[in-house]
Image (tube, grey):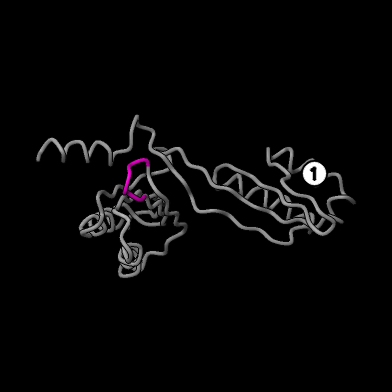
Amino acid sequence: MEEKRLYTLLVYSENIAGILNQITAVFTRRQVNIESLNVSASSIPGVHKYTITAWSDEDQIIKITKQIEKKIDVVKANYFTDDQLFIRETGLYKLSTDAVLKNPEISRTVRRHDASITEVNPTYVIVMKNGKTDEIISLYRDLDAFNCVLQYTRSGRIAVTRGKQEQVSEFLEQREKGK
């Protein structure tokens, strides 16, 4: 049996109501859990970009990608491994102000992880960290060891390909030439 690894799917579609449900249904039917999901406008007018991560083996991720691409409103879908993309996430950490003031090692930990304090009030301190998934989780673990974390959340992954332009741009250019 093939080993599972984390794949990132970049899916481009027209901005049509219900397409997100159609895309996630493909994962549900194949019993593959989505780890993160981010949807936003792309660099192409009228086209939205879905960045989806999931643990899978390559055979299954190929099938999922092909099924998603068959959806009528999907323009293009591709899957990637981490080394093929530039990836970032954001972590937000709400810390106890009392704990931060009493223990200077907490602030040193924040600086050591290249995170920033974005808000301070009498009750809590908000820390923000941009980076790769493992960097976001590492800061959480280090802060959690101080027993000062009141809340923690991580954004979904955002990613761009390492190529000059998005593959969907090349696809759309080829489609226009073929008309």
89 vs 138, left or right, is left
Residue 103 on the magenta span: no
Q: Nearer the viewer, residue 122 or 106?
A: 122
Residue reaching furthest left?
Answer: 179
Mark 1: amino acid: Ser
Taking the image as shown, residue 147 lies to the left or right of residue 25, namely: right
Quadrant (top left/top right/bottom left/bottom right) for the N terminus: bottom left
- Tell me where residue 14 sits by quadrant: bottom left
Question: Could you tell me which residue is drawn at 42 percent across and 51 percent down?
Answer: 40
Q: Position of residue 113 (x, y in %)?
A: 69, 40
Bin the neighbour count of mark 1 within 10 Å (Cα to Cα): few under 14, some 14-19, many 20 and up. some
Please say whether residue 47 is one of the residues in the magenta stretch: yes
Q: Quadrant of residue 168?
A: top left
Q: Residue at x 40, y 51 (%)?
A: 51
Q: Which residues are magenta?
A: 43-48
Examine the rendered structure and indicate whether residue 138 appears above or below residue 96.
above
Q: Is residue 107 left or right of residue 47?
A: right
The image quadrant where one finds the C terminus is top left
Residue designated by label 1: 107
Q: Residue furthest toward the top?
A: 164
